[in-house]
Amino acid sequence: MSDVESTQESGSWRKGEFVRWQDLFVPLEAILVWIGLAGIAIAAAMSMNRHTGHSNSVLLYFLSNPGKDFVGKQIMLISMDLVVLFFVWRVARRVCDGAMVARYRSVEWTAILFALLGGVILAVATMVVNVQLMRHSIVTFHETPGERSMLPQSPANLPLGLLSIALVAPFVEEFYFRGILLSWLKRKMFVPLAAVISAVLFALVHFRFVSHPGADGWVYTGMIATVGLVNATLALRFRSLWEPFAVHAAHNATLVSTAALLPLFWQ
């Protein structure tokens, strides 16, 4: 059944309206807008400093040094995700009435619980596979400074990390990759192929093969693609983004929590 033919419990797809190929570039447009807004905010903070004579502006520090500490980086990512969400929502709103409701239609709570459990299992499987690959000297994994600064280094930073990495980012990414991109792809090709392509693109835009040149980067990319394929399958099967979001959120939450809490048990 096509998007146009289907009617959800609340919110309906508008007859004759489709996701267009131009809509696939809305995340890039949103990021460019976010960069412009950040530049304006930095300029405003610098101007305020000149007029007030204060050189220790907290706003200026976070805007001009977002990658130097965990809190600044997470604030930067959350703000960027929210701008992307607005742009993606505008596309979804054009295509269907009740844009969020139509895609995040209600599902059984048991399905959400199983999806959460599936996300945890995927994360644990990822960690087990990585350990086995390293133990048998098949692949050597390296943690980059950028990745280290992205993860909470203490339990105190865990709530912000979970908000950014396990809630906001998965919600926005599922809305785009499964709600927009997959919707466009499945109109153009065989549905299973559309699911595979969406999963591959989802993995590639994380650029792990760039930050980790070598075998480990492609292993990471393959693992992200696996999560993307699972979520694409769930989105197609249940016609809702709640299950993919639950898998994604639980997967990221498990990895983030492990990074923050595991060192406590090794001290």
Image: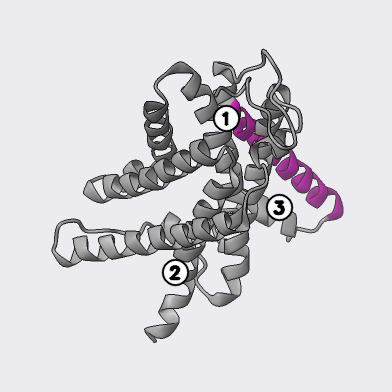
The residue shown at (39%, 58%) is 122
Task: Look at the image and tell me in which quarter the C terminus lies.
Answer: bottom left
Element class at badge 1: helix
Quarter of image, res 7: top right
Residue 174 sits above or below residue 8 on the image? below
Query: Helix, strand, or loop for circle 2?
Result: helix
Number of the label disc, if any, that sits on residue 13: none
Q: Mark 2 = which residue?
A: 259
User: Please, what is the dominant secondary structure of the magenta stretch?
Assistant: helix
Residue annotated with mark 1 = 180
Give whichever of discs 2 and 1 has the lower sequence position: 1
Badge 3 is on which residue?
60
Magenta span of residues: 26-52
Q: Which amino acid does label 2 sit on?
A: Ala
Please name the residue shown 48% across and 72% down the image.
Answer: 260
Q: Position of residue 256 (x, y in %)?
A: 49, 64
Q: Which of marks 3 and 2 is in front?
A: 2
The span from disc 2 to disc 1 (Cα, nearest Å) is 31 Å
